[in-house]
């Protein structure tokens, strides 16, 4: 079947894991695989922790860098800066993706952690607007752009790395370790936000407390760098090098020869992106700022939801190995269509800690159904020679358009319509796009990687 089609080959029966030589998987191969999975997951945890904490501390960042008489205007400015980081994700996907397809996944993933660590540390050290004036928000935006550039290459690289190390029949489970580490990063970020907001008074949080997680993110970076420097390149990329099959122009090939699978990757990625950034990143600020729920309670609820997401993500990845990626993803998309509005209605009509926990936990379960199979399904759409680039471009465009500005869009919709339920319409519309995409493609479960 031509790779120019939007779909990948139909699902194949589950195969027994094999080593790169085709013989029985040896203990050495198993050890190498475990080390690769752990190194990739830890590095991805560091990367995404650094990226996510910006949104979790949006209110304090806004007060420091975008002072305004109207707190909603300040929050809008902060979420706009948060979204600017996502504008750079497609650029990072193109540049770092091409580097990873030509020079190797390992080198690219070491680069992304280094860039993210530098930008995160600087963010936590920038003086406020009151101290250096307009230079403060300009420096903040610059750091956010570097973070976005780094993450644009990280997500697709980690997904490709894990799936290329996994044998057929286990790609969903092993690929889900990427999203599992994202869940751990979300737990760490929300727990830190909950602890800081519960132990520090609002003045201290605004003055200096918000800087603590950014410094912690920088301190964690050397761990990710060390682990990634010690692993071997993926077997799939090594085969491509040995066969002289490395793409000379991966970006051009991705946007021409494989443009339809790239569009499929874009459509598939929308539903979970919006669900994540609406319910996990926007919701705590919305709950504390407009529903009157205490900040510590709001972030504790987010931490509970993050635990639900993290626990069920590998389960859903494993389930996709058994029944197919498409079935699990479609249930998630339709779940958002049906429950998007009721979930917002629940927390608005019951603005309590319990109402918020129920809303975010149900949304987290739907997100786990999306996150579990996602890395595998996107990787299986492309051959090794362009996988890093093509996967990164499709996913990063969806995150930029539908995810990065989700908190801004949600805040804007509430401000313009006067209805706190209006963000639900954005969630439902996004889920419909992904559902239609899923109906148009064939299930690529266990399709050959080359």
Image: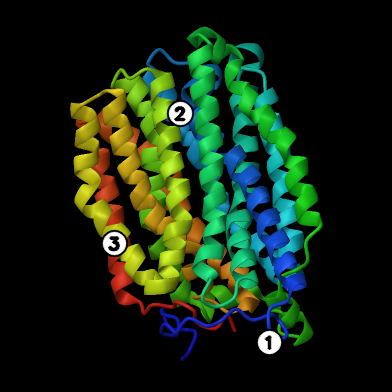
For the residue carrying disc 3, how many other residues have a C-alpha within 10 Å: few (<14), some (14-19), or many (20+)? some
Which SS class for mark 3? helix
| Residue at (71, 37) in percent of width and height | 220
Which SS class for mark 2? helix
**Left or right of residue 125: residue 208:** left
Which sits earlier in the primary sequence, circle 1 or circle 3? 1
Rendered position, 3 above or below 171: below
Residue 10 lies in quadrant: bottom left
Badge 3 is on which residue?
331
For the residue carrying disc 2, how many other residues have a C-alpha within 10 Å: few (<14), some (14-19), or many (20+)? many
Which sits earlier in the primary sequence, circle 1 or circle 2? 1
Disc 1/disc 2 C-alpha distance (Å): 55 Å
Badge 1 is on which residue?
22
Residue 109 in the image: x percent, y percent? Answer: 71, 56
| Residue at (55, 43) in percent of width and height | 184
For the residue carrying disc 1, how many other residues have a C-alpha within 10 Å: few (<14), some (14-19), or many (20+)? few
In front of the other: 274 or 448? 448
Badge 2 is on which residue?
77
Number of numbered labels in the structure image: 3
Which sits earlier in the primary sequence, circle 3 or circle 2? 2
Residue 394 in the image: x percent, y percent? Answer: 49, 64
Q: Can residue 201 be seen in this snapshot?
A: yes
Disc 3/disc 2 C-alpha distance (Å): 35 Å
């Amino acid at each position: 079947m031509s790779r120019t089609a939007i779909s990948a080959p139909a699902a194949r029966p589950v195969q027994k894991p094999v080593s790169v030589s085709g013989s029985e998987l040896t203990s050495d191969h198993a050890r190498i695989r475990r080390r690769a999975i752990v190194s990739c997951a830890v590095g991805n945890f560091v990367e995404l922790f650094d990226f996510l904490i910006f949104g979790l501390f949006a209110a304090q960042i806004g007060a420091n860098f975008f002072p305004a008489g109207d707190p909603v205007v300040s929050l809008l400015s902060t979420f706009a800066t948060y979204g600017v980081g996502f504008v750079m994700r497609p650029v990072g996907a193109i540049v770092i993706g091409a580097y990873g397809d030509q020079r190797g996944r390992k080198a690219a993933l070491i680069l992304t952690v280094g860039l993210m660590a530098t930008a995160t540390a600087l963010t936590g050290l920038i003086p406020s607007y009151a101290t250096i004036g307009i230079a403060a928000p300009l420096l903040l935006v610059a750091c956010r752009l570097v973070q976005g550039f780094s993450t644009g290459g990280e997500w697709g690289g980690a997904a490709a790395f894990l799936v290329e190390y996994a044998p057929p029949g286990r790609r969903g489970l092993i690929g889900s370790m990427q999203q599992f580490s994202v869940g751990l990063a979300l737990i760490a970020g929300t727990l830190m936000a909950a602890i800081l907001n519960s132990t520090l008074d609002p003045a201290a949080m605004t003055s200096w407390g918000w800087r603590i997680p950014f410094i912690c993110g920088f301190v964690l970076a050397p761990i990710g760098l060390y682990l990634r420097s010690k692993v071997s390149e993926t077997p799939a990329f090594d085969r491509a090098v040995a066969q002289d099959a490395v793409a000379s122009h991966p970006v051009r090939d991705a946007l021409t020869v494989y443009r339809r699978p790239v569009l499929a990757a874009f459509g598939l990625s929308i539903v979970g992106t919006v669900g994540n950034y609406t319910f996990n990143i926007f919701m705590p600020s919305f709950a504390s700022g407009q529903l009157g729920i205490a900040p510590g309670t709001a972030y504790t609820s987010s931490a509970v939801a993050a635990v639900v997401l993290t626990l069920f993500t590998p389960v859903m990845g494993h389930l996709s190995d058994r029944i197919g990626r498409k079935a699990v993803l479609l249930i998630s998309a339709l779940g958002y269509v049906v429950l998007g509005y009721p979930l917002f209605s629940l927390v608005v009509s019951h603005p309590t800690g319990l109402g918020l926990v129920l809303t975010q936990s149900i949304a987290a379960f739907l997100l786990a159904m999306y996150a579990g199979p996602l890395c595998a399904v996107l990787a299986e759409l492309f051959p090794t020679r362009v996988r890093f680039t093509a996967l990164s471009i499709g996913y990063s465009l969806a995150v930029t358009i539908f995810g990065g500005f989700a908190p801004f869009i949600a805040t804007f919709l509430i401000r313009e319509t006067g209805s706190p339920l209006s963000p639900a319409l954005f969630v439902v519309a996004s889920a419909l796009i992904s559902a239609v995409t899923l109906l148009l493609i064939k299930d690529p479960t266990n399709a050959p990687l080359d």
